Image (cartoon, grey):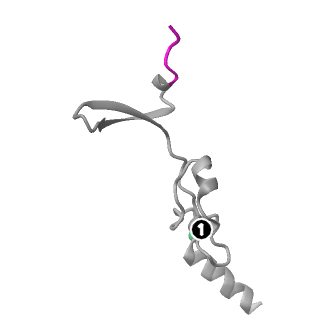
Amino acid sequence: MRPSKQKSRTFRRSQKRTPGGRTVRAYALRLPKKLCCSGCGSELMGIPRLRPSRLASTPKTKKRPERPYGGVLCSRCSRKRITEAARI
Ligand SMILES: [Zn+2]
């Protein structure tokens, strides 16, 4: 018998209760890391943590904030970048 691929620690384990009342072990792939601001390194808000296959089916407007530098810089860093660009 071939060993189960899901026994690898690539998969997260969780306990799920079935409709029949049994408790079974469920396996799911780990989520990707949180995205960080390229300016200060803090975690970016408004960005879903999904696997690439799920990310492809989610609309673009739900994947990053709709402003300049959205999804790259945090709100504080983007505000600073825009005001500095306006002064020059
Ligand atoms: Zn930042």
Q: Residue furthest top?
A: 1
Q: Residue furthest bottom?
A: 87
- Classified by dominant secondary structure, the portion drawn in magenta counts as loop
Residue 81 location, quadrant = bottom right
> Residue drawn at (60%, 70%), measured in percent from left and top?
61
> Residue drawn at (77%, 90%), measured in percent from left and top?
88
> Residue drawn at (66%, 87%), measured in percent from left and top?
83
Q: Is residue 37 above or below residue 20?
A: below
- Write down the residue under mark 1: 64
Image quarter for ligand 1: bottom right
Closer-to-camera residue (82/50): 50
Q: Is residue 2 above or below residue 6?
A: above
In magenta, the rendered stretch is: 1-5
Q: Position of residue 87 (x, y in %)?
A: 73, 92
Closer-to-camera residue (68/21): 21
Q: Residue furthest front?
A: 20
